[in-house]
């Protein structure tokens, strides 16, 4: 396969990037001064940058390249579809084969009762759709005042005004007039940081009951839905205590509110089942999907609706849709991606082989002096950095200072590992082998050693009081 190697020198690319290209979630001036890393190609679990470095991608891009990089089958699916029908819409009483086939395949894979797909171009768009879906559902049921959506602090549901409002990221809410009305945020099930003196089991029940408190406080007649990621991803791979989801499910069953599982990261094999809802034992009315749906090869997302919700929506005109809802090229690529995940038993590989290997590797890192707990589900996991593990202490420095240092040391050791605050995250392509996971472990340990040294040098090993 030919690769593009005749590009400009890295410094020129960086200068042009700084001059014209604005980056998401970035302080532009800082990045311009430093220069962005230029990724030029990728294969399997490895990226190559413009300097020729081979970097192990422990994050599968942004948690999305489930099938790994460089699959010719997906290229061919896109080529065929672009030749045959590069674009048509599904508004105005038309449809096309890729949208039909993909919706059917998704319904096939999804848990029982979840049989109807509304396509979007991304996870953010799909969650915007969900806000309108659940409110329209209750309006059609004769309860238009049932419009409050309960979400969680530190949740991530996207970056548009609607989905960013659902999310619970304080930094996002501080910019641009969010959240929109009638969105509430309860506490997250983050035992390590927020569990205080409760056991994980007690803490799981306590934070789940905040949902019940919210419903009782505002009245069942006002609360439309609860939205949550089965396992919080961007919040730091927060695996809830085992007591959490059963209690949330009990509350959703007791009161008449819809449960939305945001499966954008957890879906399509990440947790060792097709969907995180299966791993966590929950029964959502709506699931948000994107990312792994196409393994990131094309932008596509959507909402999967339970029959009970879909039939109410279908009885009215839902005044909503995107030019690229069900885009034929994106749909064709997603369908081929699902075929590969299915036929190559990738989900079984996560559950039986790669997931246990990642868990063992990450747990082995907890003997490191600055590593506290490791939490791993399937192929997503995180380790908490701490100056004192017994007390689950936080660092005295601004949260994220130490995580950032560690991420830089990972990069320097040709490993992409992300930090969320002072947690270090892994979410590699699902096709990763146990040997490659060990390679991550070696590079991560070296990065942790270097981080420890840097903390000593900079006097940052102190605990917050
Ligand atoms: C990434 C993400 C989204 C947003 O998806 P985009 O495609 O970036 O709009 C929504 N929910 C979760 C859980 C995510 O991780």
Image (cartoon, rainbow, N blue to C red):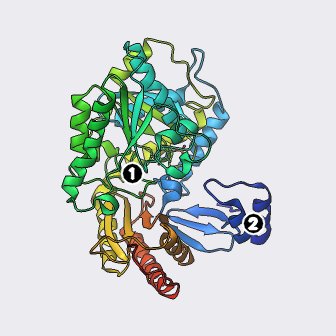
Q: Residue at x 57, y 30 (%)?
A: 325
Nearest the viewer among 67 and 324 is 324
Q: Are marks 2 and 1 in contact (CB under 8 Å)?
A: no
Kindly state the secondary structure of the residue where label 2 is placed. helix
Q: Is residue 14 above or below residue 301?
A: below
Q: Quadrant of residue 384?
A: bottom left
Relative image position of residue 151 (x, y in whole percent): 40, 40
- Mark 2 neighbour density, 10 Å: few (under 14) some (14–19) many (20 or more): many
With respect to residue 384, does 83 lie above or below?
above
* Residue 50 seen anywhere in this rendered image of the structure: yes
Residue 449 placement (x, y as % from top left): 44, 84
**Where is residue 420 shown, x and y percent of the image?**
47, 62
In the rendered structure, find residue 14 and report the number of the disc placed on it.
2
Sequence-wise, the earlier of marks 2 and 1 is 2
The relative height of residue 215 versus residue 244 in the rendered view (above or below) is above
Please give the name of the residue rendered at 59% of the width and 32% of the height, measured from the top-left corner. Answer: 327
The answer as to whether callout 1 falls within 8 Å of ligand 1 is yes
Disc 1 packing (10 Å; few <14; some 14–19; many ≥20): many
Left or right: 442 in relation to 361: right
Return the residue nearer the eye: 319 or 148: 148
Residue bearing the label numbered 1? 232
The CB of the residue at mark 2 lies under 8 Å from ligand 1: no
User: Going 38% across and 52% down the picture, which residue do you hit?
Assistant: 270
Q: Is residue 422 left or right of residue 208?
A: right
x and y, in percent, of residue 305 in the image: 39, 28
- Quick check: 238 above or below 143? below
* SS at mark 1 in the image: loop
Res. 7 in view: no
Quarter of the image that includes the N terminus? bottom right
């Amino acid at each position: 396969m030919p690769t593009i190697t005749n590009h400009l020198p890295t410094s020129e690319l960086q200068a042009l990037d700084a001059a014209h290209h604005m980056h998401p979630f970035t302080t532009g001036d800082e990045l311009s001064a430093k220069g962005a890393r230029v990724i030029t190609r990728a294969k399997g679990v490895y990226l190559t940058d413009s300097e020729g470095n081979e970097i192990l991608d422990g994050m599968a891009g942004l948690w999305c390249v489930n099938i790994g990089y460089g699959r010719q089958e997906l290229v061919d699916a896109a080529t065929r579809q672009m030749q045959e029908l590069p674009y048509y819409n599904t508004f105005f009483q038309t449809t096309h084969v890729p949208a039909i086939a993909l919706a059917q395949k998704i319904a096939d894979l999804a848990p029982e009762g979840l049989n109807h797909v509304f396509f979007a171009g991304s996870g953010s768009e799909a969650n915007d759709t969900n806000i309108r879906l659940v409110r329209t559902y209750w309006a059609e049921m004769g309860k238009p005042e049932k419009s409050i959506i309960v979400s969680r602090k530190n949740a991530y549901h996207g970056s548009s005004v609607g989905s960013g409002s659902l999310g619970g990221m304080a930094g996002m809410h501080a910019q641009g007039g969010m959240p929109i009305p009638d969105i509430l945020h309860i506490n997250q099930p983050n035992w390590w940081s927020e569990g205080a003196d409760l056991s994980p089991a007690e803490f799981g029940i306590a934070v789940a009951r905040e949902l019940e408190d919210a419903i009782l406080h505002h009245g069942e007649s006002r609360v439309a839905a609860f939205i949550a990621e089965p396992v919080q991803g961007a919040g730091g791979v927060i695996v809830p205590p085992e007591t959490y989801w059963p209690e949330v499910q009990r509350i959703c069953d007791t009161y008449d509110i819809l449960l939305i599982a945001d499966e954008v990261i957890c879906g399509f094999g990440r947790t060792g089942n097709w969907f995180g809802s299966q791993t966590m034992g929950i029964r959502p009315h709506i699931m948000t999907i994107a990312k792994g749906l196409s393994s990131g090869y094309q932008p596509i997302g959507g909402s999967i609706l339970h029959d009970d919700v879909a039939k109410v929506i279908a009885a009215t005109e839902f005044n909503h849709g995107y030019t690229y809802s069900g885009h034929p090229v994106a749909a064709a690529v997603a369908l081929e991606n699902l075929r590969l995940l299915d036929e190559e038993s990738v989900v079984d590989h996560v559950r039986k082989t790669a997931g246990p290997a990642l868990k063992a590797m990450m747990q082995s890192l907890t003997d490191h002096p600055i590593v506290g707990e490791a939490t791993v589900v399937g192929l997503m996991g995180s380790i908490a950095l701490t100056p004192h593990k017994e007390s689950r202490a936080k660092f005295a420095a601004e949260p994220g200072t130490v995580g950032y240092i560690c991420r830089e040391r990972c990069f320097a050791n040709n490993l992409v590992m992300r930090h969320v605050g002072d947690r270090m995250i892994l979410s590699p392509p699902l096709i990763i082998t146990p040997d490659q996971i060990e390679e991550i472990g070696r590079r991560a340990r070296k990065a942790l050693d270097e981080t420890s040294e840097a903390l000593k040098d900079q006097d940052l090993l102190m605990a917050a009081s």
